[in-house]
Amino acid sequence: IGLAATQVNVHERIIVIDVSESKDSPQVFINPSFEIIEEELSDYDEGCLSVPGFYETVSRPQAVKINAQDITGAHYEVEANGILAVCIQHEIDHLEGKLFVDYLSTLKRERIRSKLEKEQLSRAASEQYGELLKHRVGELEQSLSKANASLGTERDGAKALQVDNQALQVRLE
């Protein structure tokens, strides 16, 4: 739904959000900020590319006024509620170094951190195991190649002996 430039290692205050049903109407917010215009909070299940695979309920103000620039540099304001209000707050958090998990209880945050660390260790172990397997397969392929070369030499030697033997038999007859 949204992406902050900082999530892709671009250190600019730029956000792109598309909350359209058809996912073909991206909105660009440059140097965005917002003011809360509805203090009442709404709960939304949020997820994030920065914390893949985890979704948690976060309470945020229901309506905000967004101040930003468009891609031409023109300043504009727009009032947002619902999912757009949630997205703009979520993405501005990224620009300010916050993640949705920062709104969760310490216990939930620690559980997510622990699961992510286990997944990371598991991926690292799988990668190391994969590299070890590649190395071992390479060694086996080299050994097989040497064995085939050796067999080829032995076959050539056996054929030569067979030819010599046949020649000897021809001479004896």
Image: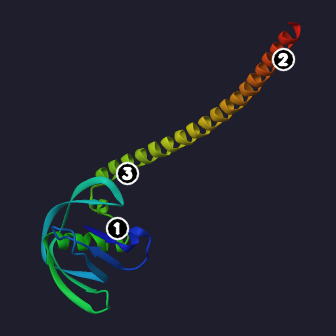
140 or 121: nearer the eye? Answer: 140
In this rendering, the label closer to the viewer, 2 or 1:
2
**Is 128 placed left or right of 91 in the picture?**
right
Q: Residues within 10 Å of mark 3 (few under 14, many from 20)?
A: some
Residue 86 in percent (x, y) is at 20, 69
Is 41 situated above or below 165?
A: below
- Where in the figure is residue 150, as x and y percent of width and height? 74, 27
The one nearer the camera, 86 or 101, is 86
Q: Which residue is mark 3?
A: 113
- Numbered label attached to residue 164: 2
Question: Disc 3 vs disc 2: which is toward the camera?
Answer: 2
Q: Position of residue 75 (x, y in %)?
A: 26, 91
Nearest the camera: 141 or 163? 163
76 w.r.t. 123: above or below: below
* Residue at image location 30% in from the left, 50% down from the top: 107
Q: Residue at x 15, y 62 (%)?
A: 43
Q: Which mark is residue 152?
A: none
Q: Which residue is mark 1?
A: 98
Helix, strand, or loop for circle 2?
Answer: helix
* Quadrant in which residue 81 is drawn: bottom left
Dot 3 or dot 2: first in sequence order is 3
